[in-house]
Image (tube, rainbow, N blue to C red):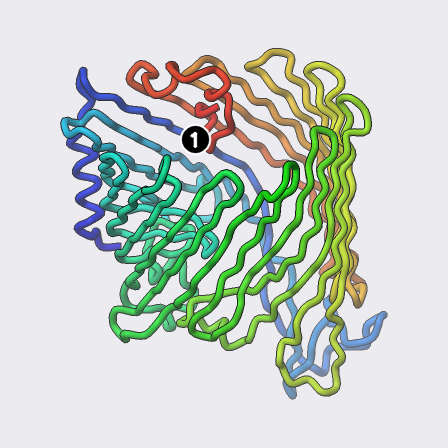
Amino acid sequence: MRPRPLVLTGLALAAAAVPARAQGYRLVLDGRMQQVAFRGWQPDSVLRTTVGAGPGGGFISPDGFAVQCRQENWCQFFRPGQVQNSLPVAGTADLTMWGVGIRGVRLHAMFRAAADAGDAPYRPAAQLFEGYAEYQSGAFTGRLGRQTFASRLGFTGFDGAQASYRFGDGGMFEATAYGGLGLAPNMGISIGNVNTVPLGDFAPPSRQLVAGAMVGMAGRNADLKLEYQRQVDRDARKLFGERAALSGSVRPFERWSVTGGAWYDLVTRQVGTAELSLRYGTPTVQLSAFGRRYQPWFDLWQIWMAFNPAANEGVGATATVQALPGVSVRGRAEAFRFEIAGGDSPLVRAEREGWRWATGVLVTQVPRWTFDAGAVFERGPGAAGRSFDASVSWRPRDELAVRTYGSRLDRPLEYRFNDARVTWAGLELDWTVNRTLAVGGGLVRLWETRARPDAAAFDWAQTRAIARVTLLLDSGGADRLDLPRATRRMPSTTRFGQ
């Protein structure tokens, strides 16, 4: 990926800001690795004259593999591939700097590097997710460089500029506009990069233009947000996509709230993913009823749009009740249905309805111990699922946590061919050594079986090892130690934000 001027601007500003006495910085280094083995499938074929009748119907090869004979002289099948051992290692650096000589300026960069010490290569080896300079003065905030954010329209990453302005009592209203050259979804590389587009001939030759705006309101009894985004192919001058979204919540009475939102495709003129929920909550009871619609969305240049992806809709309810002090019971039930896909198959009647429900119990009554168990049952078009899980967590000291867990998943299919069962058990440990260092790791054992009447059935058991380390470097903790203890313990995306 060729560097762009705005990315270089953000990186140059970050590199030039060498920590000095009047400056502050916060750098979080996070490293993780996992050992895992996997196998795929490799295509093969045999002469049609060599196959015979299988035990459950159909044809079978001389060495016992189920085959499909779609050609005049040859039959095709897949056999298990070679075992691949993977040892991915990833490191992330998250740097924030302030007090760089201009009042109100903050520099931020997040970089990730990864490699594989096993058989499988890892690509891309490096990604710059964010690298920007931010200026804030009163109600105005501006950013320049590579930046990312998530919203109802999904993940958006771009190299460009963003400006926000807050107004009203206490900043009740906020308006934001942004624009630049887009990145691939959830990646720090361009949309046409070979690592993101397996359909290479269909990839756009250059990065798309991204522009959008957001207007939001945050009040005592209501929140509301309106979004708009447009993506354009710079070469063909054609749309990648154009959507608008509306989301919000209303709290009309104490303990009651209504939350919902939806996005609308301005190109196809269709409503996309949407949901609406009614919630009631007390310290001991939380109830909700919801309706939802999920619509897959792809950029207009992608070939997947030609397959007319079908949406699914569902209605359901959830409940969590504290039956006893330190004991809570939860449940969820939902019925769903897929919309008609629009494909022409007059001889096939496809099932469209399904249901799922789940239940569980959480026990925190014993000091420093947590017990959790649950079950999920689901039945839908073509497949069903049953899973059971349980975990036990022990925190002998505030800085040390030990957790053991286990689960089992059964996935019976409609035609009862290639049914799968997976069982796993694991042990995890997290240790905050001091305010600058935290380490963790674990072991997981998996047992997987495939119920097939041919030679492609195999037992796939393996042990996975996991390790992680997080290091905090800062300018004396000026951004953290002066905060109230309750604030410092709030959840964060990084361990040291707690």
Is 345 left or right of 192, judged from the image as shown? right
Looking at the picture, how far across and down is residue 420, in whole percent? 75, 54
Residue ID at (76%, 72%): 351
The residue labelled by disc 1 is 31
Q: Quadrant of residue 461?
A: top right
Is 255 left or right of 55, judged from the image as shown? left
> Is residue 378 shown above or below 240?
above
Q: Quadrant of residue 231?
A: bottom left
Foreground: 166 or 454?
A: 166
Residue ID at (18%, 18%): 22
> Is residue 147 shown above or below 382?
above
Is 238 left or right of 444, judged from the image as shown? left
Looking at the picture, how far across and down is residue 175, in whole percent? 33, 49
Looking at the picture, how far across and down is residue 495, in whole percent? 47, 26
Residue 388 seen in the figure: no
Foreground: 299 or 40?
A: 299
Residue ID at (70%, 29%): 283
Disc 1 crowd rating (10 Å Cα; few below 14, some 14-19, many 20+) is some
Is 302 left or right of 378, judged from the image as shown? left
> Is residue 330 shown above or below 291?
above
Number of numbered discs present?
A: 1
Residue ID at (79%, 67%): 415
Quadrant of the image for the N terminus? bottom left
Looking at the picture, how far across and down is residue 491, in whole percent? 51, 28
> Is residue 97 shown above or below 132?
above
Most extreme residue toward the right is 55
Residue 405 seen in the figure: yes
Foreground: 387 or 331?
A: 331
Badge 1 marks a residue whose secondary structure is strand
Q: Amino acid at mark 1?
A: Gly
